[in-house]
Image (spheres, grey):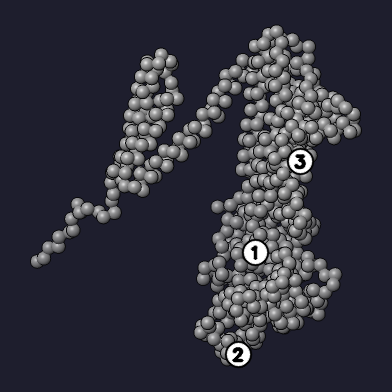
């Protein structure tokens, strides 16, 4: 169920602008990898390039390769739709579909793709996914109400349930807790801890405590100045990044002496 | 033993300012209108003309604006005075805009009520000279022509808007946007001439058909549908598109099953308003759909009467019993207004039921 991602010398461009330069990371399966760094350093861009979501912006392209268990996501003839079916994503702001109920939101990956599924299989999938996202007990009695009626933290867990319902190999999370309160954040972090036994998880976060709490490995990105491309500064075990980093700027950033 | 003296409650609160009592503006308005009435009466008496309500309103309004501003300036200060002045101006403009609307509705209802009977809705004008007759053929014609106009322009308009919002990049999208803007300004008579020229190519000179009318109306309708649908699609948050794409849903399914349902309420409202906009068109239908006294259910062949053309025709060529023709024209206008009103109410009801539920 979970796969390894290798990023080899990846450059990402938005039109003529080079947003990220020379990133090489090995992302382990069944582990949490955190991307940290200042705003605008390209960590979200790198994350979105892992399931080709950055291509939604016109003019975006990459140079280099991203291998999912050896298969190049950017090889010739690769359909981004197939890539996204294997690499799910959770976004910064909770975005349940407003026209759908909680149940339909969880089933969105099935319903929107016009796949047929029996009623009982659907019920199983809804329960399994919502239990997986620690949301089942809170919503099991109101699966028929619109998903937008839930609280922010519940909506974000609903989005996680929606992402894992299509059984991806990898789960990408783009600052999943930045819009949430500490209690909801704790619930999501516990969930990440559980999910990593089954999925490869990559998380972008601005919260360094969060990175040190949930991740096994951490990548630190930085940018030399506005208009310059973001670069990977250091990638290592999380414990090492936060206690004894080998690059000075990493130490400055994680200890709060940056800038 | 010490006693603490509570600070005096009666001390001046530094946050207060002078205030006009709530009835003051109304009192000033009443006095202003009385003075206006007096002036109007004096003018009427001096010149021997009729008592003019317009003068009462005009003089009263100006006096009210001046007096309320001055009084408010003295008691409440400059900011409140400006507020009262602008409030007066805005309300005045609103009332001014209401006058033609109310006057139009009252006139049409009063004049149209004369023939607003059962026969009017069940008879055509076949073999009718003078009194009697009805507009059933015109109602059927209007409904059919507008329905076909909608059948032509709604798919074209919505697909164009989808292209512009979801796919269009570069020169082609810019060109389409430009030409849609140009189409918005096409005079309706030109649309009618275009439809006539188009159908004359196939069916020869002198062609008349309901479908031709529908084509002419759809020319006027398409830009409205494109514009309103485009605005509605742009309102759909990008988050939803990304959420769907990230689930491995292809782009066309994302548009069909996420973007369109989310914007559906607005699109339906826009389409209905576009229909309401073209249903009253007269000029193009006069040219291409023509007029007839007979029922015609076939849009593909033959002349077809419509309500606006019926009203025009009754008014412009009355027979010996003029009043019967004028009454029918007014009633036809009333029926048309009612149809447009029903469409608008329908759009609101549909928008209400299709709008995404908040669930709270």
Label drawn at residue B153: 3
Question: Along the line of sight, which residue is nearer the eye, A124 or B39?
Answer: B39
Work out which residue is located at the far left of the displayed protein and give it.
B1
Helix, strand or loop at mark 1: helix
Q: Earlier in the sequence, mark 2 or mark 1?
A: 1
Residue A28, position in %: x, y?
71, 82
Helix, strand or loop at mark 2: loop
Image-based side of B19 in relation to A182, left or right: left
Foreground mark, 2 or 1, reads: 2
Query: In the figure, residue B150 lies in which quadrant?
Result: top right
Residue at 68 percent across and 38 percent down: it is B274
* Few, some or many residues within 10 Å of mark 2 (<14, 14–19, 20+): few
Helix, strand or loop at mark 3: helix
Label 1: chain letter: A
Residue B110, position in %: x, y?
57, 19
Q: Is residue B21 above or below residue B124?
A: below
Residue at 37 percent across and 34 percent down: it is B64
Query: In the figure, residue A109 lies in which quadrant?
Result: bottom right
Label 3: chain letter: B
Residue picked out by circle 1? A159
Residue at 68 percent across and 68 percent down: it is A89
Residue A45, position in %: x, y?
67, 73
């Amino acid at each position: 169920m979970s796969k390894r991602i290798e990023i080899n010398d990846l450059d990402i461009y938005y039109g003529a602008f080079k947003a990220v330069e020379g990133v090489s990371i090995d992302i382990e399966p069944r582990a949490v990898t955190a991307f940290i760094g200042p705003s605008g350093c390209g960590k979200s861009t790198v994350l979105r390039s892992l399931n080709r979501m950055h291509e939604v912006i016109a003019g975006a392209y990459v140079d280099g390769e991203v291998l999912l268990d050896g298969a190049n996501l950017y090889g010739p003839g690769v359909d981004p739709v197939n890539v996204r079916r294997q690499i799910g994503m959770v976004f910064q702001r909770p975005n349940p579909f407003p026209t759908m109920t909680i149940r339909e939101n969880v089933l969105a990956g099935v319903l929107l793709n016009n796949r047929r599924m029996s009623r009982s299989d659907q019920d199983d999938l809804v329960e399994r996914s919502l239990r997986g996202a620690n949301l089942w007990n809170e919503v099991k009695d109101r699966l028929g109400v619109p998903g937008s009626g839930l609280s922010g933290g519940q909506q974000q867990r609903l989005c996680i349930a929606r992402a894992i319902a299509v059984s991806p190999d990898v789960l990408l999370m783009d600052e999943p807790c930045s819009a949430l309160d500490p209690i909801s954040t704790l619930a999501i972090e516990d969930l990440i801890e559980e999910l990593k036994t089954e999925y490869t998880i990559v998380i972008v976060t601005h919260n360094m405590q969060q990175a040190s709490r949930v991740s096994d490995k951490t990548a630190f990105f930085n940018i030399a100045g506005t208009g310059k491309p973001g670069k990977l500064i250091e990638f290592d075990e999380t414990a090492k990044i936060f206690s004894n980093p080998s690059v000075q700027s990493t130490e400055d950033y994680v200890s709060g002496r940056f800038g | 033993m010490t006693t603490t003296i509570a600070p005096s409650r009666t001390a001046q609160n530094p946050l207060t300012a002078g205030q006009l009592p709530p009835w003051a503006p109304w009192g000033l308005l009443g006095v202003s209108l009385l003075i206006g009435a007096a002036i109007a009466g004096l003018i009427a008496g001096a010149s021997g003309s009729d008592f003019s309500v317009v003068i009462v309103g005009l003089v009263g309004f100006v006096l009210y604006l001046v007096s309320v501003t001055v009084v408010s300036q003295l008691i409440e200060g400059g900011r409140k005075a400006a507020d009262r002045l602008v409030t007066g101006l805005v309300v005045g403009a609103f009332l001014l805009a209401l006058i033609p609307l109310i006057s139009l509705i009252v006139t049409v209802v009063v004049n149209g009520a004369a023939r607003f009977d059962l026969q009017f809705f069940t008879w055509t004008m076949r073999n009718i000279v003078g009194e009697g007759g009805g507009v059933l053929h015109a109602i059927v014609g209007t409904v059919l022509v507008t329905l076909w106009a909608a059948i032509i322009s709604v798919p074209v308009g919505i697909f164009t808007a989808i292209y512009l919002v979801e796919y269009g990049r570069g020169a082609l999208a810019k060109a389409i946007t430009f030409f849609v803007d140009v189409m918005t300004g096409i005079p309706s008579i030109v649309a009618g001439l275009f439809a006539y020229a188009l159908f004359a190519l196939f069916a020869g000179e002198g062609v008349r058909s309901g479908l031709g009318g529908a084509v002419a109306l759809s020319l006027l309708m398409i830009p409205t549908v494109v514009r309103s649908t485009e605005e509605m699609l742009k309102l759909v948050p990008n988050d939803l598109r990304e959420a769907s794409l990230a689930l491995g849903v292809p782009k066309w399914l994302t548009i069909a099953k996420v973007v369109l349902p989310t914007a559906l309420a607005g699109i339906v409202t826009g389409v209905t308003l576009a229909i309401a906009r073209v249903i009253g068109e007269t000029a193009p239908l006069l040219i291409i759909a023509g007029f007839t006294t007979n029922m015609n259910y076939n849009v593909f062949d033959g002349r077809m009467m419509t309500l606006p053309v019926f009203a025009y025709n009754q008014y412009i060529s009355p027979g010996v019993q003029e009043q019967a023709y004028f009454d029918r024209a007014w009633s036809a206008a009333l029926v048309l207004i009612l149809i447009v009103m029903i469409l608008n109410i329908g759009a609101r009801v549909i928008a209400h039921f299709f709008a995404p539920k908040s669930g709270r």
